[in-house]
Image (cartoon, rainbow, N blue to C red):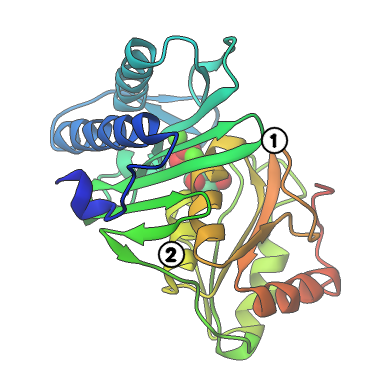
Amino acid sequence: MNFNDVLPLDLSSTCNREIIQKSFHITKNAGFFAKEMHSKNFSIHHKDSIDLVTEIDIKTEKQIISSIESSFPDHSIVSEEIGEIRKSSPFTWIIDPIDGTTNYAHRLPFWAVSIGIYENDNPIIGLVFAPEMNQFFIGIHSQGAWLNGQRIFVSTCENISQSLLSTGFPYDIRETSYTNLDLFSYFCKKTQAVRRFGSASIDICYVATGLLDGYWEQDLKHWDFAAAKIILEEANGIITTIHGDTLPWKHSSVLCANKKLHSVIATEIAHSNAILKRI
Ligand code: IPD
Ligand code: CA
Ligand code: CA
């Protein structure tokens, strides 16, 4: 897998060229490492009753972080398993080493390495690599979004009853009242269908590619959407909280779609009588 096949873009005048090229290699290597390990035995631990972490989540994260630290020792890192490593530089890498861990633990191929890089609050690059499905998504701020080197755009579907949506459910579903189940049933009756794939970053990238028309979830972490947000926006999509507000730099609900459908779904959510997270 070559850089130019995945990102056919002239970077000669881009000031972040080194970050873009190295982040591609770091994401690619992490994805191939986790893919290779998927056919072997690995240990699985419970963070909570249904929230899993595998030995490979930890090893993949370590590999990513040590590559970043050797190339960009002053860059900050926010990563799911290790937390925050704050440094002096304005650049921050937001990492989900394996997004779709439950799938990974059950040997399903639907998981991805997700890395978003920001300079202060400004997006630079989003990378989502699903190696077992041979899908490498990249979004470069103000330049566009690609899947395996092909430009991608959100769908043109504006009609909720013809839309295919996706969603997900929180790990504390057994305890919380914010289960998302009422909104799930609501949209099952309003749309063509609602899917649950189990990897938020891929869900958002599938909206960016027009394979799905929209996606929402009520309780995501920053590393679930930081990379895919850049890809979705570069594919002309809109991504906000389920209330239509700007996504915060922390845990949040997420709603994304093309511009017209986004506003239709947001209005449906507001009128649904479902129990909604405040953010
Ligand atoms: C999870 C996946 C899942 C979503 C959960 C996330 P993880 O991330 O993205 O699709 O429904 O909310 O926490 O735990 O597999 O990295
Ligand atoms: Ca995740
Ligand atoms: Ca994860």
| Secondary structure of residue under mark 2 | helix
In the image, is 205 to the left or to the right of 181? left
Q: How many marks?
A: 2
Q: Residue 241, located in which quarter of the rendered image? A: bottom right
Residue drawn at the location 81% of the way across and 75% of the way down: 267
Tell me residue 176's x, y (percent): 73, 43
In the image, is 121 to the left or to the right of 76? right
Q: Residues within 10 Å of mark 2 (few under 14, many from 20)?
A: many
Q: Residues within 10 Å of mark 1 (few under 14, many from 20)?
A: few
Query: Quick one: 54 or 150, which is closer to the camera?
Result: 150
Residue drawn at the location 30% of the way across and 30% of the way down: 22
Please give the residue where the numbered disc 1 appears in the rendered image. Answer: 249
Whether pointer 1 and pointer 2 mark residues with C-beta atoms closer than 8 Å, the reply is: no
Is the residue 147 above or below the residue 96 in the image? below
In the image, is 249 to the left or to the right of 163? right
Kind of residue sitting beneath label 2: Tyr
Indicate which disc, 1 or 2, sits on the residue closer to the N terminus. 2
Is the residue 150 above or below the residue 177 in the image? below
Is the residue 274 above or below the residue 199 in the image? below
Is the residue 207 above or below the residue 171 in the image? below
| Secondary structure of residue under mark 1 | loop
Residue 173 visible in the current orientation: no
Query: Quick one: 134 or 217, which is closer to the camera?
Result: 134
Tell me residue 212's x, y (percent): 47, 72
Q: Residue 156, located in which quarter of the rendered image? A: bottom right
Residue 107 visible in the current orientation: yes
Please give the residue where the numbered disc 2 appears in the rendered image. Answer: 206
